Image (tube, rainbow, N blue to C red):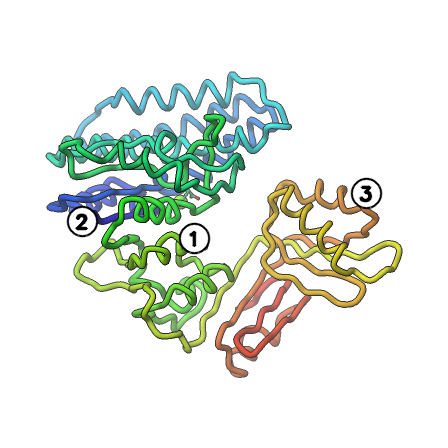
Amino acid sequence: MKVYKFGGASVKSADGVRNLRRIVDGEENLFIIVSAMGKTTNALESVFTHMQNRRKREAADEIKRIKEYHASIVDDLWGGHVEIEAVNRLFGELHDIAVDTVYRAADAELWYDTIVAYGELISTTIISEYLEFTGIRNRWIDMRAAFVTNQRHKDAYVNIKVSEPRLKAATENTGVGVFVGQGFIGAAPDGTTTTLGREGSDYSAAVAAYILDAESMSVWKDVDGVLNADPKIFKDAVKIDALNYLDTIELAYSGAQIIHPKTIKPLQNKNIPLYVRPFGDKSKPGTVINGEAEHVTLPILIYKRNQVLLTIRSRDFSFVMEEKFAVIFSLLDRFRIKTNLINNSAVDLSLCVEYSWHIDELIKALNDENFSVEKIDDVELLTIRNYTDELYDRYASDQDLLVRQSNPASVRVVLREAKF
Ligand code: ASP
Ligand code: MG
């Protein structure tokens, strides 16, 4: 079995879907994991925000736009107007949930997951039907039935032991060789839908590869492979031919948009190679990630926007030490806030965290624990691994720096607004 994962950008249009079909054509033992089409997850996040703010009309309008977007892809694929009943049913459910349900703030994450999961449910339904329509027999798999996760909405982990027999049962002795499942989603032990974290489809594919003992996993992307920097921001980005698992985890963790950070562990545990390949050209080799590749020594630039800098200080002026750290990090965990950089001095702790709608609640909880918190919104984090003085000067030295942290392997700076 091979596992292929197609991200949202690769299926954002009818051409993208036709291209997916070309890539999978002729494969006989294949599990395909697909993300939501294009920017659908972002659009569904807006539906959720409207629901949170009780804006029913706006939620309904946004759903209508999402529906029209998918309908135009379907019509193009089928070469004329068609209604896919299963797709209409999914849109009907989504509308009922987002517009006709009484929202309770205490269940924010649960509603978020329930709503955003429709992006993948809809994309996979369309793709499975299209493959069937064009002669590729396949089976649509509801990953909410296959993947049991922990009871943690918005950032769940798959419980592999419990999920293994389910996914195997769904794929064994079916007489079918091609399977289409959703990335990004699963279900908690209580049966409610969970999501695995934004961009989590890679992780879904890795877990499927692990359970199905896949010979390889491929991620088809709109780039030639893994590059050493985002080519949209940094000129001179170059492709890396091979990476080992450890370097890949480090890079993903620092925010490189290679692959979701949770993806590597399941693959590494069974030594399954991961190929990052350009969906525009199946003949290009892309980048291989495995256990054997040499450690990368070329500079790598990772730039993350949408960060918040929190400087936390104990009000009683005691040193921020272990027990205080424990309180602070358990609150970060409780509010699901992702920390990207930690910098501490004797009296304060600075955290560069991912923007989240829970930050003000976190600050309130920290205040209750007798910490004062200073917050700077909208900051950016630049990491240069294997840096040189020349690169540091070029990209970091002229910026409005708030934090600078370095070690022999990398330099990381938090800045107000990068001018590259
Ligand atoms: N559709 C989800 C997202 O955009 C998951 C993914 O793309 O991997 O975050
Ligand atoms: Mg996506």
CA distance for labels 3 and 1: 34 Å
The residue type indicated by label 1 comes to His
* Circle 1 residue: 260
Relative to 6, say whether 317 is above or below.
Answer: below
Q: Which of marks 3 and 1 is nearer the N terminus?
A: 1
CA distance for labels 2 and 1: 23 Å
Find residue 308 and report its horizontal and vertical position in percent. 64, 54
Residue at image position (53%, 36%) is 153
Residue at image position (61%, 76%) is 397
Local secondary structure at mark 3? helix
Q: Which mark is residue 368?
A: 3
Residue at image position (31%, 44%) is 211
* Circle 2 residue: 23
Relative to 239, say whether 174 is above or below.
Answer: above
Looking at the rendered image, the disc whose residue lies closer to the viewer, 2 or 1, is: 1
Find residue 72 and report its horizontal and vertical position in percent. 28, 32
Find residue 96 and report its horizontal and vertical position in percent. 46, 18
Q: Which mark is residue 290?
A: none
The residue type indicated by label 2 comes to Ile
Q: Which of 243 and 82 is in front in this view?
A: 243
Q: Earlier in the sequence, mark 2 or mark 3?
A: 2
CA distance for labels 2 and 3: 55 Å
The residue type indicated by label 3 comes to Asp
Local secondary structure at mark 2? helix
| Residues packed near mark 1 inside 10 Å, few (<14), some (14 to 19) or many (20 plus) | many
